[in-house]
Amino acid sequence: MEHQQNVLLSEMTFQHHTEDAEFKRRVRKTTILLSVITVIELGIGLTIYTIHKGAHPNAYLVLAFKGMVCILTLAKAYYIVSVFMHLGDEIRNMIMTIVVPLMLFIWFIAAFIIDGNSYKNLRNEFDPHFKESTMPKKHGEEHTPAPEPGKQ
Amino acid sequence: MATTATTHQTKWWSGGKSPFNVEYGKLMMWYFLMSDAFTFGAFLISYGSIRFSQNFWPDPNVVFNAFPGLGHKPLPLAFVSIMTFILIISSVTMVLAVHAGHNGNRKAVMKWIAWTIVGGLAFLSCQAWEWHHLITGEHAVLADGKIEIIGQTMTGNPWGQLADHNAMLTALNNSSNDVLATLVHESPLKPEFHDMTHKQLLGIPKDQLLGMINTAEMHVRSKGPIAFGGYFFGITGFHGFHVFSGVIINLVMLIMTYKGVFDRKGHYLMIEKAGLYWHFVDLVWVFVFLCFYLI
């Protein structure tokens, strides 16, 4: 079959030919890696859950864990794109035509998150009703002792 | 073309060959996926923007904590982790299908594509269950001084902040008999009334109904941000639609492989393109999973 393809597309050399053994090793490694990262993410998710359940949740600790999950997700995305989608095997120029436009996301995410945050700050400053009705009560002020989950 | 002799590097732009060494359709699939990434990115970033503009946002571990057949037991992340693993595994079977295509192994291509379709259908079924559970779930919320029973929909969000206990007691007094009957019926705290039908309960006077509710251990939430429903159903729905179309594409690939179309063409590049689409669906899920369930 292999030679048939080369004859058909003589002026091009599309195939990223990988040996069966090498391919199997790579796929197995990537699958294990993705699974392990997902399990770690789930572990962090449950950690955040237990922190929230505790009497005095540490907001910065939660934020740090959430940041870790984001980084792990980016690692997963890298492995999916580079190994499963074989982008890593393409020619550099071609990779760049995909990756460089995606850099726009850096501005995109930062700008809109900062914008949302600034809107919240403005409303808290100038809209007392918004602040009054939506600001979470500090722990201890709440009448009910432990937050439920799952009672309802 | 004498240049190639003097240098080790291939001159990709000297003509006569594809400068990216990629088939046209595959290159265009990449560019389509890039644009699709921006569509999904825009949705998720808009969600992030709204979320950052709120003082309170529902805790995903409270919203997504159900598991089929296990009732009210809180199991955060359990069901969605199964969905995630289904997609990862179906991505692996797709890689195997593409590789089998490289080797021109028709039987193996069909086998792995079929497994990928099974994975896609399993994922869609899970999502259908999850949506159904969220929409039809009955949650008591405190709104406008009364208790209401609502599900997670586009117009209502039952996952607000825990309401003050005294406010809840006042609200119970103001609530309709219908709501109280539902509360008695659904309450896991007083199982002795479970045999009574909703209709029977409606026949009971209000003050008696109130006495049948275990108010001491009852917690209600206020309504949460409405945007939550729109973003959750919109984005997971858009992703689910991608999974669905991916399943259809894979089905077409399966039929074409079965009919020997790719054997006659002499290459299985079409499987590669379907594979790219499928991996992209998995890739998007990684981010949806992050944004809605983990953080």
Image (cartoon, coloured by chain):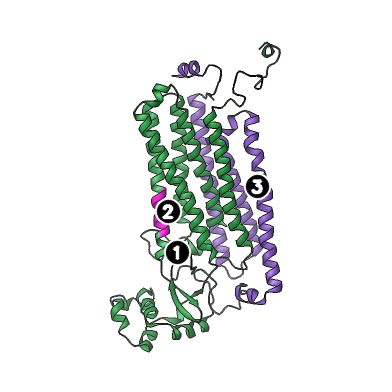
Chain colours: A purple, B green
Marks 2/3 in contact by CB < 8 Å: the verdict is no
Q: Chain of mark 3?
A: A
Q: Position of residue B291 (x, y in %)?
A: 56, 55
- Percent coordinates x, y for residue B20 in the rendering: 61, 27
| Mark seen at residue B189 | none
Query: Are the residues under badges 2 and 1 in a single subunit?
Result: yes
Specify whether residue B163 is in view: yes
Q: Which residues are magenta?
A: B123-131
Q: Amino acid at mark 1?
A: Pro
Nearer to us in this view, A127 or B145? A127
- In the image, what residue occupies the spot 50% across and 77% down? B143
Q: Which residue is mark 2?
A: B127
Q: Is residue B248 left or right of residue B272?
A: left
Q: Which mark is residue B74?
A: 1
Q: Which mark is residue A105?
A: 3
Predominant secondary structure, magenta span: helix
For discs 2 and 3, the disc positioned in front in the rendered view: 3
Secondary structure, mark 1, is loop
In the rendered image, the quadrant that contains the C terminus of chain B is bottom right
Task: Specify whether disc 2 shares its chain with disc 3.
Answer: no
Residue at position x 64%, y 77% from top? A129
Picture residue at 51% right of the left edge, 61% below the top: B230
Could you tell me the amino acid type at mark 3?
A: Phe
Q: CA distance from mark 2 to mark 3?
A: 28 Å
Looking at the image, which is closer to me, B28 or A99? Answer: B28
Look at the image and say whether residue A148 sits in the magenta stretch. Answer: no
